[in-house]
Amino acid sequence: MAVSGAAHADGHENITSAHGYSFYGDLTYPEDFPHFDYVNPDAPKGGEISLGTVGTFDSLNPYTRKGRGAALSTVMFESLLGEGVNAASAPADVYAEYYGLLAERLEYDEGKNWVIFYMRPEAKFSDGSPVTAHDIEFSHNLLLDQGLKSYADAVRKRIPKVEVLDDHTIKFHFAEGISRRSLIDQVGFVPAWSKKWYEETGARLDEARLEISPGSGPYMLDSFDVNRRVVYKRNPDYWGNDLPFNVGRNNFDSIRIEYFGDAEAAFQGFLAGEFTFRTENDSKKWATGYNTPKVNNGSIVKKELPNGSPPTPSGIVFNLNSPVFEDKRVREAVALAFNFEWTNASLQYGLFKQRASFSQDTPVMAKAKPEGAELELLQSLGDLVPPDMLTEDVRQPHTSSEARLFDRRNARKAMALLDEAGWAVGDDGVRRNANGDTLKINYLFNSSSPDTLSGAMENFVSNVEKLGVDISFEKVDPSQYTSRERDRDYDLVYDAYAAFLGTGTGLRQRFGSEAAEFSLFNPAGLASPLVDAIIDASLTAETREEEVAAVMALDRALRYEFIMIPVWYNPSFWVAYYDMFEHPETIPPYALGQLDFWWFNEDKAAALRSSGALR
């Protein structure tokens, strides 16, 4: 990274010119790096990897609120700064560092008031047309005009002006008086769509459709059969094959996705060879389902691989806009009905750990009482911070009896809380308030979920019912689930937030008040002045140490607000695949990378076919 002596209009500010970007200015890979350290630069190209998924799709446009986009339907599109397949981290061995892909370099002033991207003139779409700054400007504006409201509202305030300086140079101006976080990387990751295609077809970003615009990425759409499969093939004329960014990556000739009606059908399809790579998330299947001839004779490899990213914060999410959950005591009572210890021992073979944090097992996970820089930050927020947050240990999930599903000790606590909240038990065993209204809760659940998860949630619902709550467990098909979740038509929903290792303005879409009413990334509808203030403080951090203190405080505050019942997590990747795929000896911490930097061994594939393990 170079800081030139060039000056901005005021004649004073230094200009940074670099081949990549990180907020603090440090880049691990130099400008002349030959490839990322974790890839195999000699990985062969060829073969197919196939995955299975459960559900349906009726669109190849993943950016609309309407319909369900096909799996991996973003894979064709690139951005000025590069990333991995399906928005995975690239490079996957460093945190919050980004390197040029469509852009060969960028420049920005010392105050990060603007950024200029200098694009690679050789970049082109799969139809052979060049990728230009006009396409980037068009894509940016298309997201504002037809994209998600939470995204568009946030970006308009932060990026007031875009200039095309020439066909391959574009400048973004940033608003005054706001954090400089997530500005340069925000515009750097806008997907590049073909302006020409959209104008000629009249297609909209907010409509479900089966036509797709040409992309500039290494893969392009090959074929699809709605609700059955979609296939992407490697573009033989991909413009970026020889870039250091891509060396050792994008190794498969094709990526195929097979669709199944439910989780069991998908699992049986894998064992039958209908697809060849599976990431397992069902503990019962992992413990008992792979005792098959193909696994025992080595045709299928079953292994655990390290996962350095924080686990996804999944769990039973409260809709905070539901009147019944406005009282935190009711949320606490319902949570006490979940028995992790029994569930893990009886249904999950003891394979999981109980999750507590939104940044589980990372350096930014809140622990014990706040101290040091985190305590100073919380104290600086004054009355926004409840006193007990400063003096008590961070919230931990309750413990339960492993021996009995219905933990009587927790049940007594839960019933006392419901009594305090004004929900008394009637002679019929049902709880009602002073107005005679029944304590009713609707739990929305995706019917395509694994059987083990479904069983765990049915047991939770059974325990809630024993507290005198009228709870309905609604299993709906994936399309209904998507539609109702978007409309927040539930009291409880099994969903997830995004884990975080650092700050960024995306935290506002996930946890902030401004977009709480409609953000698809905030299923609880959390709107907390305390959380807002901590996010704001994180965005103004000037050092990594200050940033760590702020996001640690954010983890503490989110746990205090109690927006979800955390369930379990697996600190490793569970994978099973037909023994024809290979990967680097060391998996980088931030991506499994099976679609990114694994590769195909044709000799092994031939042996599998010869033995009859694969058709």
Image (cartoon, rainbow, N blue to C red):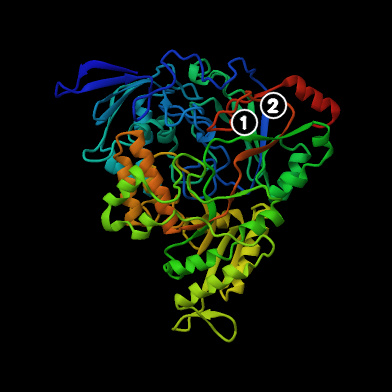
Is 342 drawn above or below residue 275 in the view shown? below
Q: Residues within 10 Å of mark 2 (few under 14, many from 20)?
A: many
Q: Nearer the viewer, residue 135 or 210?
A: 135
Residue at horizontal 48 percent and vertical 84 percent from the top = 436
Mark on residue 581?
A: 2
Mark on residue 550?
A: none
Is 18 drawn above or below residue 406 in the view shown? above
Q: CB of mark 1 within 8 Å of CB of mark 2? A: yes
Q: Residue furthest left?
A: 10
Residue at horizontal 31 percent and vertical 38 percent from the top = 541
**Quarter occupied by the C terminus:** top right
Q: Position of residue 539 (x, y in %)?
A: 32, 41
Q: Is residue 607 left or right of residue 549?
A: right
Q: Position of residue 267 (x, y in %)?
A: 73, 45
* Residue type at the position of mark 2: Phe
Q: Nearer the viewer, residue 113 or 138?
A: 113
Q: Nearer the viewer, residue 426 or 54?
A: 426
Q: Secondary structure at mark 2?
A: strand
Q: Is residue 320 left or right of residue 399?
A: left
Q: Position of residue 274 (x, y in %)?
A: 74, 38
Q: Which residue is mark 1?
A: 594
Q: Residue furthest bottom?
A: 427
**Quarter occupied by the N terminus:** top left
Residue at horizontal 51 percent and vertical 75 percent from the top = 416
Q: Secondary structure at mark 1?
A: loop
Residue at horizontal 47 percent and vertical 49 percent from the top = 65
Task: Please say whether residue 393 is visible from this viewpoint.
Answer: yes
Task: Please say whether residue 451 is visible from this viewpoint.
Answer: no
Q: Earlier in the sequence, mark 1 or mark 2?
A: 2
